[in-house]
C-alpha cells in the first residue's frame, strides 16, 4: 500500500476509486463504503482512501481527541483490506479553507484521477464544510467520475457511528462494540519490557503501553486474544495502572497468554478485547494479587474452552 502523508503535492499513478472520511474505528458503516471502492478494483481502478491528518475535530478544536483507531492501526487495517493508496492529507488553515469545488476539481480529479467515489450521506469537506454528496453528484458528469451514495447502517434503530461505539466502549460493553465494529475492539503496539512481576509470580504477561490518544475501556480484566505474526492466541488482559504494584498512574495493557512461552519483546501485536470480566482493584498484598490473577486465568481458560466448543 502506498502512503501519501504530509504533503499536498502528489499525483496518483493511475485512475482511482476513492472513499473520503475520518474512518475512526473502521466500523461496519465504514466497511460498507470501503467495500465499494475495493469492488471497483475489478474495473482496473486503484482503491484509494482519503483522510485528514490531524483529523478535523482535532484541528478545529485545538484539543486532542481520543481515537478508536490510531494512525498506525488504520494503516495496518487498510493494508490488510487491500487498499492501494492511503492519502493522509495535511489539515491546516490553508487546506481547511479550500473551496469545496476546488477540492473536487484540483485534488480529487487533478491529483487523484478519481473515476469513482463512494460517499456517505454525512460526508462534508471543503471550506466551511460546504462540500457534500449533492455537490459531488452535481459536478460528476462534467469532471468524468461516478458517485455512489451509501446509506448509514442501523443497529437496533440507531445509526452506527464512531460516537456510538465510543459510548459503548466507555461502558465496557465489548460484545456490543464488536457487533458495531464488525470485529472485537483492538489495542495494538510493540511489546514492551515491564517490571517482570508477572514472571516473578509465575504468570508472565505481554505488555503494551498504549498511546495517549488511544481510547481504552474502563480499567479492569478482559477476556482477550492476541494476534502475533498472523496467529491468534487466547488470553486474559488487564487494562489499568496496576494500583497494587505501582503509583505512577501509567496506563498499561498486560495480557497473559495460555500455552505461550515465546519471547516477543519489540514485536508488533494486536490485543482484541472480547468481554469484560471485572474492574481493576488494589489488593492488600502480592499474595492476594497472585491469588486473584490465578482465579482470573482459570476463569479465562473456562471461557475460551466454552467458546472453542461453540457454547460461548
Image: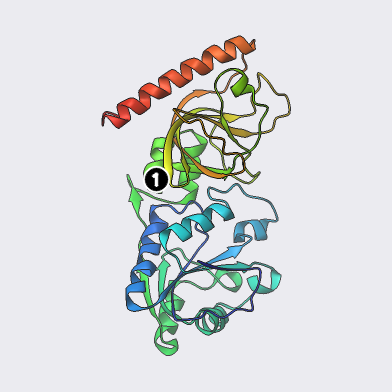
Residue 117 horizontal/vertical position (percent): 41, 74
Q: Would residue 186 be found to the left or right of residue 288 on screen?
A: left
Q: How many marks?
A: 1
Q: How did the renderer colour the structure?
A: rainbow
Q: Residues within 10 Å of mark 1 (few under 14, many from 20)?
A: some
Q: Nearer the viewer, residue 210 or 153?
A: 210
Residue 202 horizontal/vertical position (percent): 56, 19
* Residue 298, picture quadrant: top left
Q: Nearer the viewer, residue 211 or 217?
A: 211
Q: Compared with residue 78, is residue 204 higher up or lower down, i.e. above or below?
A: above
Residue drawn 51% across the image and 54% down it: 24
* Residue 283, picture quadrant: top right
Which quarter of the rendered picture does the C terminus lie within? top left
Residue drawn 36% across the image and 60% down it: 32
Q: Which residue is situated farthest in the front direction here?
A: 262
Residue 154 horizontal/vertical position (percent): 34, 51
Q: Which residue is mark 1?
A: 183
Amino acid at each position: 500500500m502506498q502512503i501519501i502523508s504530509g504533503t499536498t503535492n502528489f499525483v496518483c499513478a493511475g485512475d482511482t476509486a476513492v472513499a473520503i472520511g475520518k474512518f475512526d474505528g473502521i466500523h461496519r458503516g465504514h466497511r460498507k463504503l470501503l467495500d465499494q471502492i475495493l469492488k471497483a478494483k475489478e474495473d482496473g481502478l486503484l482503491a484509494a482512501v482519503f483522510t485528514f491528518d490531524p483529523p478535523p475535530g482535532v484541528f478545529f478544536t485545538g484539543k486532542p481527541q481520543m481515537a478508536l483507531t490510531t494512525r498506525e492501526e488504520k494503516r495496518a487495517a487498510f493494508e490488510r483490506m487491500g487498499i492501494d493508496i492511503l492519502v493522509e492529507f495535511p489539515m491546516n488553515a490553508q487546506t481547511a479553507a479550500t473551496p469545496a469545488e476546488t477540492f473536487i476539481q484540483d485534488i480529487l480529479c487533478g491529483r487523484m484521477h478519481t473515476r469513482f467515489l463512494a460517499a456517505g450521506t454525512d460526508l462534508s469537506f471543503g471550506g466551511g464544510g460546504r462540500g457534500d454528496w449533492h455537490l459531488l453528484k452535481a459536478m460528476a458528469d462534467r469532471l468524468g467520475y461516478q458517485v455512489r451514495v451509501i446509506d448509514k447502517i442501523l443497529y437496533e434503530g440507531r445509526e452506527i457511528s464512531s460516537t456510538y461505539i465510543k459510548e459503548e466502549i466507555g461502558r465496557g460493553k465489548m460484545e456490543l462494540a464488536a457487533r458495531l465494529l464488525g470485529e472485537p475492539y483492538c489495542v495494538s503496539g510493540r511489546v514492551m519490557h515491564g517490571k517482570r512481576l508477572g514472571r516473578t509470580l509465575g504468570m508472565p504477561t505481554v505488555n503494551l503501553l498504549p498511546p495517549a490518544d488511544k481510547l481504552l475501556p474502563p480499567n479492569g480484566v478482559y477476556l482477550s486474544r492476541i494476534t502475533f505474526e498472523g496467529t491468534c492466541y487466547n488470553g486474559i488482559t488487564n487494562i489499568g495502572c496496576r494500583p497494587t504494584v505501582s503509583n505512577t498512574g501509567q496506563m498499561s495493557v498486560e495480557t497473559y497468554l495460555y500455552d505461550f512461552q515465546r519471547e516477543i519483546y519489540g514485536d508488533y501485536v494486536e490485543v482484541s478485547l472480547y468481554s469484560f470480566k471485572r474492574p481493576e482493584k488494589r489488593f492488600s498484598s502480592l499474595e492476594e494479587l497472585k491469588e486473584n490473577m490465578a482465579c482470573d486465568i482459570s476463569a479465562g481458560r473456562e471461557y475460551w474452552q466454552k467458546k472453542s466448543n461453540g457454547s460461548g
